[in-house]
Amino acid sequence: MSSAQLPSVRDLPLRVLPVAWLARGSLGGRGSRHLVERHARVYRHTWLVLLSGFFEPLFYLLSIGVGLGKLVGTVTGPSGPVSYTSFVAPALLATSSMNGAVFDSTFNVFFRLKYNKFYDAALATPMRAGDIALGEISWALLRGGLYGAAFMIVMLAMRLVHSPWAVLGLPSALLIGFAFAATGMAATTYMRSWQHFEFVMLAALPMFLFSTTFYPLSVYPRAIQIVVECTPLYQGVALLRGLTLGAVGPALLWHVAYLAVMGLLGLYVASLRIGRLLLK
Amino acid sequence: MPDPEVLIRAKDLTKRFGDFTAVDGIDFELRRGEAFGFLGPNGAGKSSTMRMIGCVSPRSGGELSILGMDPVADGPAIRARLGVVPQEDTLDVELTVRENLLIYGRYFGLPRNVISERTDQLLEFVQLTDRGADQVEPLSGGLKRRLTIARSLINEPEILLLDEPTTGLDPQARHVVWDRLFRLKQRGVTLVLTTHYMDEAEQLCDRLVVMDGGRIAAAGSPRELIEQYSTAEVLELRFDPGEHEQAAEKLADLRAQRTEVLADRILLYIPNGDIALTAVRDLGLVPLTSLVRRSTLEDVFLRLTGRQLED
Ligand SMILES: Nc1ncnc2c1ncn2[C@@H]1O[C@H](COP(=O)(O)OP(=O)(O)OP(=O)(O)O)[C@@H](O)[C@H]1O
Ligand SMILES: [Mg+2]
């Protein structure tokens, strides 16, 4: 990845992000692009930061997937026995989509809301609160999309992809990012201090560990299975795992619907709250 | 019927924060091409008013029409035609000087080549041409203020809103800003500014309102206000602290039009300062220092509110 590649990313029309596009009319519009452009410009100076988002899931894949996979051998996936690495890889992709989105839409947004008057400047122009919410989320998605694409390439190279349905893996990763970015941003508008970010950690870490990331749902007793099935990260893991392992059925659409509704709700609340916090 | 030359019309405009009323039913009109000022001390409600005009703060009551539109319904359309210099700088510290103008211009939906052209002119206008590639953070307060002014002009606004444009700047930096604002005025840009410096209001404003406690205490041109609320000249006297009160009592005999006894000075409002000074000496009073000067808006403010504008 080089810094020279980013401007083309910046010019990527939002149209390629289907859910964000759906939300454009009502919850934010063209103005959001300018915020994305601004962030891309900042990261052009500091593009190195972008690398960590790529290496984190890769290191997990190498240590847990490959390392632990040596001991475990095969596990029962949604479409029968698969190598442990193939089982874990889509879950790590889902997790990295979640983490990237949450990080971008909570820490950064909180800082801009509380300290540097960044949004006040934008709101003095024709930009609307909804443009800001959608812009922040789109940026988180673009970043997440880059990581996701890189990770998919690694998965392909390591022969961890077992179905042509995997071409939907990247849009799905973006959908996961959208759901978490929007919700994270909405939650951030309620935060008063940095301490409240402990709650974000408290939500994200157990989801990462228990949402069937490292072993199938069947290891849990039924009661716990139900709890896990309700978490958003589980939806993302199940969706990506189904696509890359080729266990595709209408059930996957439920996961899509869950994540889309979560994202749209988050975007709606975030727009509303940003307007309320800044335009008083 | 609405006069096209009236750009902003406010009637009984009110802003409340919870139970607290920050702007308490003010009326004013802004006409095209004029420089209009809100002069008032801290907490007078100047920024609250400016934010309502800037369509970033909904009014709590009354009427407000800007460029013939309603800020609640048409906020973005109005903001597209305004330039805003907020009280506190909101420059983007992660971008360079030039990039600040670029991105801000993009927020207005302007094409990059137009922004680039205007950026050259604007940086030249505020004398920042050689700082274009610099980061914003290390710039001095005066340079940041000038950059903010350049940024506010990127959309070629019809109305420029300046909230305390020179507060916190040293005298030299203030004069540079004044000079630029004066040039803008000459080019026909309509200016709305707030200030708690009476000299700033006198220098820049064609018309102004004196605000205090959320209300408008008086309105008019600087000259009109001074004529209406003060005398032609003022005699400022300073006495030894021990004699201060005694002197104040004796001076009452002079029957000046008005006498203000401040903590450190006594002000006599009279038509002719030199004659009054002779009269003071005739009373047997020996001031440590004495100064005859023309009335200013400071005196108007003192008269209207019983308080000083600048501490
Ligand atoms: N968001 C807010 N919430 C509550 N009170 C506010 C808010 N903004 C302003 N106020 C109060 O409203 C009053 C008027 O504030 P405003 O900022 O309009 O005054 P100002 O004339 O601009 O003063 P200054 O010279 O200090 O900038 C002040 O008493 C202030 O504390
Ligand atoms: Mg103010």
Image (tube, rainbow, N blue to C red):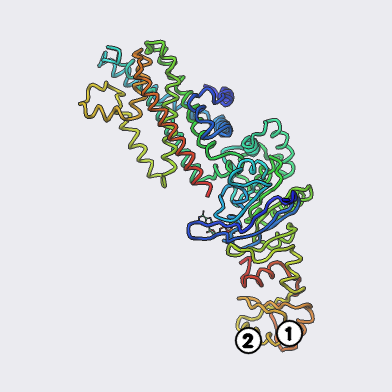
Q: Is residue A165 left or right of residue B88?
A: left
Quarter of the image with the C terminus of chain B in it: bottom right
Q: Tell me if mark 1 has few (under 14), some (14-19) or many (20+) residues whose alpha carbon lies within 10 angstroms of its own.
A: some
Q: How many marks?
A: 2
Q: Is residue B73 left or right of residue B124?
A: left
Query: What residue is pinned by disc 1?
Result: B280
Q: Earlier in the sequence, mark 1 or mark 2?
A: 2
Q: Is residue B204 above or below residue A67?
A: below
Whether ligand 1 has any atom under 8 Å from the Cβ at mark 2 is answered as: no
Is residue A11 or residue B34 the one in the foreground? B34
Regarding residue B301, the answer to whether it shows in the image is: yes
Q: Is residue A275 above or below residue A165?
A: below
Query: What residue is pinned by disc 2?
Result: B246
Quarter residue B307 falls in? bottom right
Q: Amino acid at mark 2?
A: Gln
Picture quarter with ligand 1:
bottom right
Q: Is residue B78 above or below residue B235?
A: above
Is residue B180 or residue A61 the one in the foreground? B180
